[in-house]
């Protein structure tokens, strides 16, 4: 049984004026945590994490798998959305991960990921950990004792109007922004741990002076508790998130058997 992982972290977003701080640390931290769990890891950071680079590495990860293997894909960076083109989204929006070259109109859409994930052979476990966001709301919860009060957290959302240049597409974005937003069912053949609900932000955070994604830091800390199942892991994560500083609610999507099944 092979265990392999792809860890992507993007802080540098040229042409957007929306750089982040903790995503490269996230990718390196996930790689280190997964190596302790006997995973062979590939790490893509900043300029190597183009759309082509991510897609190529993801295809290699999934196409090379055999029954019994465990695969992990972690992404830390901006998330965003574009108007839905094929009518499969209740909210009229296609969610996306933002590659390094998003300023060149290189998008990694949820439909793209679904196509890649559908290549997964039977009886292969695929864990997708996404520390990014699409849209958000604000609430107040218990204080987070590890939060650095000297640096305001930054959301990991890249608004579409910051990278879309085509006037007709910008008009479609404006129309979609006026439409009500509703949740959709998870369709990927993976067990997804997301940084937040689809109506929340994920935060580029700071813990004791070191940048990290809030969910990434809490999730890796929770692994040290040695949870027996992904559901136990998620329960441990939720002990610390949402917090007053980071009002995001990590979600675990997938079938009941997967949630109660084998850990990473």
Image (cartoon, helix red, strand yellow):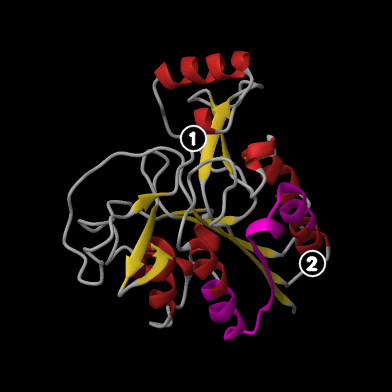
Residue at label 2?
65
Where residue 250 sits, quadrant-wise, is: bottom left
Where residue 45 sits, quadrant-wise, is: bottom right
Magenta span? 29-56
Q: Residue at x 60, y 46 (%)?
A: 14
Residue 42 in the image, given as x and y percentages of width and height: 70, 71
Q: Residue at x 64, y 48 (%)?
A: 99
Estimate how packed mark 2 is, as few (under 14), some (14 to 19) or many (20 or more) residues with alpha carbons within 10 Å.
many
Helix, strand or loop at mark 2: loop
Residue 66 visible at all: yes
Residue 120 in the image, given as x and y percentages of width and height: 75, 56
Q: Earlier in the sequence, mark 1 or mark 2?
A: 2
Residue 188 in the image, given as x and y percentages of width and height: 62, 47
Q: Is 39 covered by the magenta stretch?
A: yes
Circle on res. 184: 1
Residue 263 visible at all: no
């Amino acid at each position: 049984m092979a265990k392999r992982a792809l860890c992507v972290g993007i802080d540098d977003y040229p042409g957007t004026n929306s750089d982040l701080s903790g995503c490269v640390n996230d990718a390196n931290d996930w790689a280190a945590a997964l190596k302790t769990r006997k995973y062979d890891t590939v790490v893509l950071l900043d300029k190597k994490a183009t759309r082509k680079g991510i897609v190529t590495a993801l295809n290699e990860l999934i196409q090379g798998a055999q029954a019994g293997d465990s695969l992990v894909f972690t992404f830390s960076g901006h998330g965003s959305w574009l108007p839905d083109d094929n009518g499969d989204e209740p909210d009229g929006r296609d969610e996306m991960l933002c590659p390094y070259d998003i300023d060149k109109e290189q998008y990694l859409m949820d439909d793209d990921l679904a196509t890649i994930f559908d290549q997964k052979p039977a009886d292969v476990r695929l864990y997708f950990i996404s520390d990014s966001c699409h849209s958000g709301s604000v609430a107040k919860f218990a204080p987070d004792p590890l939060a650095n009060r000297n640096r305001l957290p930054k959301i990991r959302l890249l608004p579409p109007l910051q990278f879309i240049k085509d006037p007709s597409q910008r008009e479609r974005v404006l129309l979609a922004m006026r439409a009500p937003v509703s949740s959709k069912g998870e369709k990927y053949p993976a067990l997804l741990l997301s940084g937040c609900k689809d109506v929340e932000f994920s935060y580029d955070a700071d813990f004791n002076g070191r940048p990290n994604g809030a969910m990434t830091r809490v999730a890796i800390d929770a692994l040290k508790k040695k949870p027996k199942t992904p559901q136990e892991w998620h329960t441990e994560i939720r002990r610390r998130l949402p917090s007053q500083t980071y009002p995001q609610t990590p979600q675990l999507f997938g079938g009941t058997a997967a949630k109660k099944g084998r850990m990473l």
